[in-house]
Image: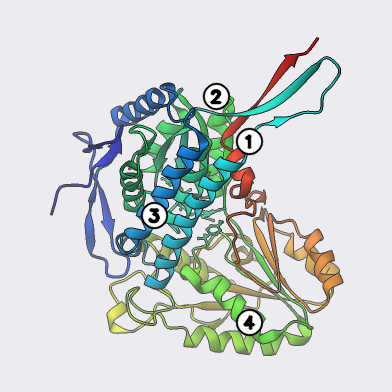
């Protein structure tokens, strides 16, 4: 076994601390150990935060001309595109996403850096209308040291979505990637150094949430936390932040309704429903995990979906034509399997899947077949709790009123999809749904320019768009006397 991959603090490679066991990166497609990655202890956390605070205090990053800051962000995007194969491969090895999706995510992560380069160069302060003998302006200032804590399901996407706007806003950042997927963030930070980012402005601490993540959140010099992950972890972080009176952005879980009215384009809708739940093995925060289908088209839709689930190519992530890989960890596969088994025991009908695949090349990996569940209502545990796996719950509805009550009838409010040819109905339903994103006659389209976040237990704050940079800034009112 080679030495554990080092962390990145103050622009330097830093090995793990003596006595802290390294993280073992496991390939979920095969069960083999990929490599080890250093894990931080309390000393490394403190060192990284102090380094970032010192780099921020030099003021060279926050006061750099926005045009120059933009040039560095563009340089990071260029570097990521040059290293696309390496980044895509790291993500594939660590979380098992199929190759085509990994390549797509490198591209979109690079585009996020480009977008925030443009935003920082073009988004300025505001001058309020003159009021007698003074004028005032609103300036937007960085917080200082920002902790960015990310999950394992789409590491490159999440890392870019936090690092790019936080840097564009002039902050120093400490990334704490998931312990399951520590390597893409380390690689992006090294690309950023090469692109001219001053040392200490982007640091990467690897380790578990309960050790490294929690120590980072409670460190007195960390002034803002941007977190994406599970709702319970988000709640814990918000509690610590409340004590520190520190702002937090929380992008949390979901149980998103995907709704098909009888006048929908059924073939287009079925394809989107299948992609919306099976892409990434269902490990997407916006997975359309509850299908509400109007009773009159229920049987035909279910038949088509079952055919699609059964024909979906589940394979090794780098197999040509693979459409779905393994779950990201064996623990996640076991959790999904346990939830389906409990639903089955409670009387649910398994319409497709509900088992591990039997193909010999998959038997050592964390695989689970695309699964469709019927015979339940919206109050069933499987319809209420986030599964984060390739499992679709089918729920028939009769009227629009009944549909809205059920669709909104969970603790979550992240995303939703509506398929109908009736634009007035589409508008009414979109307005009535309690969700941060509503897709109409499409699903899982995501633009970096459109704010994204959750209602209810799905989160606080909005990433992406210009608001995604404002998240990392505090407004300051400055008054000029003119008398
Ligand atoms: N809303 C979104 O944009 C979005 C996007 C992707 C994933 N998610 C959610 O993420 C979850 C899956 O990811 P996960 O299992 O990695 O989530 P998780 O909450 O277990 O971990 C997320 C990150 O937080 C760290 N962490 C955990 N507990 C912490 C604590 N107390 N203090 C500080 N850091 C802590 C982890 O080490 C990891 O880096 C799902 O619920 C999914 O819906 C949400
Ligand atoms: O499908 S996911 O990879 O979980 C995902 C990533 C980012 C966003 C918001 O930009 C939504 C879903």
Name the quadrant of the C terminus: top right
**In the displayed structure image, the side of residue 170 where residue 367 appears, left or right:** left
Q: Is residue 457 visible?
A: yes
* Secondary element at image label 3: helix
Name the residue that disc number 3 marks: 78
**Residue at x 49% of width, y 86% of height:** 310
* Secondary element at image label 1: loop
The Cα atoms of the two marked residues, 3 and 1, are separated by: 25 Å
Name the residue that disc number 1 marks: 124
Residue 265 locus on image (x, y percent): 72, 84
**In the displayed structure image, the side of residue 468 where residue 101 appears, left or right:** left
Residue 125 locus on image (x, y percent): 66, 32
Give the number of the mark in front: 1 or 4.
1
**Residue at x 48% of width, y 33% of height:** 146
Q: Are marks 4 and 3 in contact (CB under 8 Å)?
A: no
The Cα atoms of the two marked residues, 1 and 4, are separated by: 44 Å
Cβ(mark 3) to ligand 2 < 8 Å? Answer: no
Name the residue that disc number 2 marks: 244
């Amino acid at each position: 076994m080679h030495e554990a991959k080092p962390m990145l603090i103050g622009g330097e490679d830093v090995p793990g601390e003596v006595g802290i066991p390294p993280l073992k990166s496991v390939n979920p497609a095969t069960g083999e150990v990929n490599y080890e990655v250093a894990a931080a202890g309390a000393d490394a956390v403190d060192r990284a935060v102090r380094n970032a605070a010192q780099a921020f205090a030099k003021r060279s990053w926050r006061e750099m001309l926005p045009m120059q800051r933009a040039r560095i962000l563009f340089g990071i995007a260029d570097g990521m595109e040059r290293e696309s194969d390496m980044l895509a491969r790291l993500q594939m090895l660590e979380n098992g996403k199929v190759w085509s999706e990994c390549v797509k995510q490198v591209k979109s992560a690079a585009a996020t850096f480009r977008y925030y380069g443009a935003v920082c160069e073009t988004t300025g302060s505001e001058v309020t209308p003159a009021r007698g003998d003074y004028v005032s302006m609103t300036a937007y200032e960085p917080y200082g040291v920002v902790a960015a804590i990310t999950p394992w399901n789409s590491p490159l996407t999440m890392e870019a979505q936090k690092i790019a706007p936080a840097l564009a806003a002039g902050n120093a950042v400490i990334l704490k990637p998931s312990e399951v997927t520590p390597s893409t963030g380390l690689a992006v930070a090294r690309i950023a150094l090469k692109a001219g980012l001053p040392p200490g402005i982007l640091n990467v601490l690897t380790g578990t949430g309960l050790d490294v993540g929690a120590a980072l959140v409670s460190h007195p010099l960390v002034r803002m936390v941007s977190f994406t992950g599970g709702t319970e972890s988000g709640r814990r972080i918000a509690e610590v932040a409340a004590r520190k009176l520190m702002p937090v952005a929380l992008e949390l879980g979901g149980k998103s309704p995907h709704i098909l009215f009888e006048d929908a384009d059924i073939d287009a809708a079925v394809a989107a429903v299948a992609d919306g739940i099976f892409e990434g093995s269902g490990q997407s925060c916006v997975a359309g995990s509850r299908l509400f289908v109007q009773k009159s088209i229920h049987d035909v839709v279910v038949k088509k979906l079952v055919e699609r689930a059964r024909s979906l190519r589940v394979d090794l992530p780098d197999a040509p034509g693979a459409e779905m890989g393994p779950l990201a960890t064996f623990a996640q596969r076991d959790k999904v399997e346990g939830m389906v088994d409990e639903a089955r025991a409670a009387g649910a009908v398994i319409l497709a899947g509900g088992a591990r695949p039997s193909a010999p090349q998959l038997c050592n990996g964390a695989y689970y077949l695309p699964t469709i569940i019927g015979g339940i209502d919206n109050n069933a545990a499987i319809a209420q709790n986030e599964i984060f796996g390739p499992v679709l719950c089918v729920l028939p509805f009769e009227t629009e009123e009944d549909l809205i009550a059920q669709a909104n009838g969970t603790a979550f409010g992240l995303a939703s999809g509506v398929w109908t040819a009736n634009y007035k109905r589409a508008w009414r339903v979109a307005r009535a749904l309690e969700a941060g994103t509503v897709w109409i006659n499409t699903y899982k389209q995501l633009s970096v320019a459109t704010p994204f976040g959750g209602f209810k237990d799905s989160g606080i704050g909005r990433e992406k768009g210009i608001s995604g940079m404002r998240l990392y800034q505090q407004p300051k009112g400055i008054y000029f006397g003119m008398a």
